[in-house]
Image (cartoon, rainbow, N blue to C red):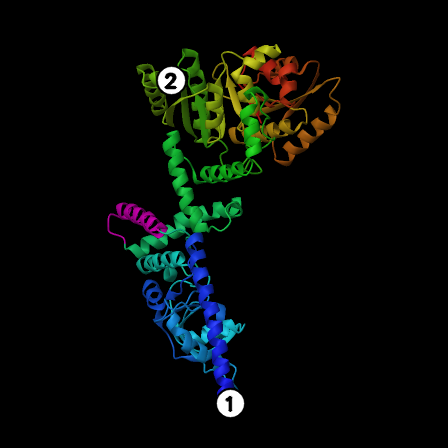
Amino acid sequence: MSELRATDVAAAVADFRKLRRQADIERLLASVTGKSADLLSFEDVRRKLRATAVSERQLREIPLDAIVGSVGRYQDFSRSFLPRNDSDSNRWARVMAASGGLAGLPPIEVYQIGEAYFVLDGNHRVSVARQNGATTIQAYVIPFRSRVPFTPDMSPRDLVIRAEQVEFLEQTRLDETRPGSNLVLTEPGQYRVLREHIEVHRFYMSEQRGAPVALEEAAADWYDTVYLPQVALIRDRGLLREFPGRTEADLYLWLTEHRAELEAQLGWEISPEQAVEDLAGRQAQATNRGEQLLEMILPEQLTPPPPPGVWRRGQLSPQDEWLFDDVLVPISGEPAGWEALDQAIAIAQRENSRLFGLHVVRDEAQLASEEARQIQWEFEARCRSVGVNGRLALEIGPVARTIRERSRWTDLVVLQISYPPGPTPLERLKSGLHSLIRTSVRPVLTVPRATRGVRQMLLAYDGSPRAEQALTLAAYITARWDTRLSVLTVAEPRQPGVEGARIRSRAYLEERGVKAEFISASGPPGQAIIAAAERTGSDVVIMGGHGHGPVSDLLLGSAVEEVLRTRKLPTLICP
């Protein structure tokens, strides 16, 4: 019996030597990959997570893969419990030999934090059990409690983050005041940033009350009034799908940082909704490099227009909130250019809008010129004089492209129209206004002269997808602004189904309680629209944007541009 046992021990020593070589290889690979192969120190984890014992030890079966550390021998074994010290060979071999006997091995003793275990006694038994292919082991378990979850797959880096989370929760007590709050971050140092957000919120609460506010109270109020509303935007947009492996708290911090960067870049205030859309759009662009490259290669006049309806934030009805919260008005500085500001001010007073002015210059010299500063001063002075919230930004770049990029942050673009696109393909190709109107993602109101009071509107409707968007917009304005509406349909030889379009528009307006006059005409659409506007005494024409492809628009033109060339009425063009 003793000879057989000696044979078993000798075989176990041979196994140990193989495992030692594997441990060295594992450590080498870890140094290359940067992924730790070390066991965790229980005391280090306990201290960082502020864990405390909660009950007496219990005997139960635990998974071997969930054992991630040791109390005293965390340097003697690897994370997969391969032996690292040659001096352990005899002891390890005796344990291995004993594991095959009838009596087996006694239970090990472990501490438990979260779902992970740390060996108090029995490191060699764990190593042998794993070598024998076991998946579980009997253990006396002493549970410890922590404010944050801890799982076996967490790395030393994750431990640092969880330690920061513990400190954050001890300071804010959000896990107690707001049970179920899931403020999990995946980057080190971010809980400090979250705490700074709460401190800023606490400062403003104290200023408002005129008395100090406790940190715990400020944290709870911040969670309810700041954090949760922005998380609701993230959920509604499905933004987590665009950022796999990240959390809602991660995106909240990225969103606030992104919003601050945008505001610094634009010189405007950006809403959380706009920041969410931009963050999602940038992530989508990162996965569509081919489309971005195509857009860079194509001339602006041949860039595909946006799909119909991208400007809408939801199904509109007369009961909806204000549609034009933010209005962009480019200012050229020419005397006639201030007509657009007068029109934008009239809209802002009706819609309680913020006005964002934009003056585009060619170079740094113009940017720093007295003329540019004077334009900025006059814009803001005119807004102040009528009690409208207005701010003008100065930017260097191509005029049409800069206006288009800025328009993404607003709900409406108001343009003074001095030089409408000409009737020939070459004139349209050279026209920045042609490309701007065709590719704008927001409705564009062109203004030859300002109309302060809008009493009568004319909607040109042909049943096309963009005309459907114009119909929605006309219904909103008619109901909100208490105006009269006439709906014009024009019969063309190549445009069948006009009667069906008229029936659809009537049904849509009646369903929303909007009254309208319906007019029919024939002939070239542009001429028919102008004639109907004059006959009805309309102050504004509403119509859908370009309906053809970019090449067809260049070659054939459109009814939109024919109306613009008359320069008679403000024209609202809906993408």
Q: Is residue 115 left or right of residue 497?
A: left
Which residue is under mark 2?
363
- Amino acid at circle 2: Asp
Residue 68 occupies which quadrant of the picture? Answer: bottom left
Q: Nearer the viewer, mark 1 or mark 2?
A: 1
> Which of these two is toward me, 288 or 233?
288
Residue 1 circle label: 1
For marks 1 and 2 on the same chain, the one whose residue lies earlier in the sequence: 1
What is the CA distance from the residue labelled 1 to the residue labelled 2?
A: 95 Å
**In the image as oriented, which residue stretches furthest toward the left?**
211
Pointer 1 and pointer 2: residues touching (CB < 8 Å)?
Answer: no
61 left or right, relative to 517: left
Looking at the picture, tell me which residue is in the foreground, 291 or 475: 291
Residue 522 drawn above or below residue 203: above
Q: Amino acid at mark 1?
A: Met
The quarter in which the C terminus is drawn is top right
**For mark 1, does the 10 Å Cα neighbourhood hold few (<14), some (14 to 19), or many (20 or more) residues?**
few
Secondary structure beneath label 2: loop
Residue 132 in the image, given as x and y percentages of width and height: 53, 74
Q: Residue at x 40, y 79 (%)?
A: 57
Whether residue 61 is in magenta: the answer is: no
Residue span colored magenta: 189-213
Confirm whether residue 340 shows in the render.
yes
- Which residue is found at the position 48% from the left and 46% from the top? 234
Helix, strand or loop status at disc 1: loop
* Residue 264 location, quadrant: top left
Label 2: how many Cα within 10 Å (few below 14, some 14–19, many 20+): few
Q: At 36% across and 70% down in the image, what residue appears?
A: 73
Residue 531 percent across, percent down from the top left: 63, 13
